Amino acid sequence: MTCEELLRLINEMVDGELDLTVAECRQFAEHLAQCNPCQVVVDNIRKTIQLYRAGEPFPLPEPLQRRLLEALRRRWQERFGSITVGQADN
Amino acid sequence: MDEQDVRSLPTAQPAASEDHLEPLLARARTGDFDAFQQIVLRLQPRIYTFARRLAGNDTDAEDVTQQTFLALVEHLNQYRGEAPLLSWLLRIAANEVHRLWRQRRRQRESNPPDDDDSAAPLARPEFIAPWRDDPEQLALQQESRTLIEQALAELPEKYRAAFVLRDIEGFSTEQTAEILGISVPNVKVRLLRARLMLRERLTRYFGDPERRVVPDHDHG
Ligand SMILES: [Zn+2]
């Protein structure tokens, strides 16, 4: 297996699962065991994905949040007629 | 690097923000706008961040976030919670971004062919080095976060979309293909290219130059 062939197999590696045949899996492991650049590349890719999954999401900036809620309130009134406050079903 | 590191990519995190939405939804369905507003406030950062990453700019992201929650007002009574609310909303947001893209492509007239690029050779990794810091730490620092988001925003649209849907949000390959209107093999090719492009770019920022590895040969 060449480095490029190994890279293409990384594509089959998702959500922690390596969706490979037994033979591919063995070749993958064998190549990695002797190829430091590929080890580092695979680790870099894993960290790249972690990076985007980690961290808090960005909230909408305050003025945009107000604008959003106003637009929603207008649509709500069109649809439900009024803005009820609290427990409407009690 | 230990064995486990090599074999496993991170799995999608459960959406903590989904907790206790059911009672709020029930109240919203009776016409309680205050309950609805609480749902919106709870989920808007996830939707906005997703839209910003997918669309690649703030203006579209704001627009898409608004359209998404307006759709929730419209479908509040149809939505019966078969899919978790968050993934339902993410899908709407994704469709909305995709609609914007199609619209613009039509306006530009000169349609760049949305071709299958599986035949093109892969860009060989060039800057290879272990990272200096953990992804979790990097994600907390303002300076690195800016770089991270910028790197993503600068990816070509089709690669970015595959990465955001599949790798960040954890949609399945099939779902990603369906949302983007492309084939499963095409999703995989785009995903690989996105991963390699981001890896190259981010390793130039976060890699340790002292420990840079230079590939000297291909193993046969
Ligand atoms: Zn190699």
Image (tube, coloured by chain):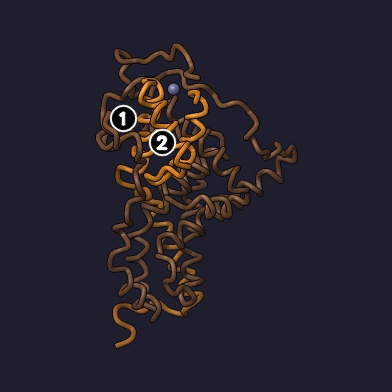
Chain colours: A orange, B brown
Badge 2 element? helix
Q: Amino acid at mark 1?
A: Glu
Per the image, the residue denoted by label 2 is B149
Q: Answer whether residue B41 is visible to the viewer in this image.
A: yes
Residues A12 and B161: in front is: A12
Q: Going by the image, does B220 lie left or right of B185?
A: left
Per the image, the residue denoted by label 1 is B143
Q: Going by the image, does A89 lie left or right of B66?
A: left
Residue at (36% x, 52% y) in the render: B45
Residue at (40% x, 60% y) in the render: B86
Point out residue B104 in the picture as x, y percentages from the top left corner.
65, 45
Q: CA distance from mark 1 to mark 2?
A: 10 Å
- For ligand 1, the image quadrant comes to top left
- Chain of the residue under label 1: B
Point out residue A2 in the picture as x, y percentages from the top left corner.
50, 23
Q: Going by the image, does A9 lie left or right of B184?
A: left
Up-down relation of residue B82 to residue B107 (above or below): below
Residues B19 and B209: in front is: B209
Answer with the quarter of the image where residue A84 lies.
bottom left
Up-down relation of residue A9 to residue B174 (above or below): above
Badge 1 element? helix
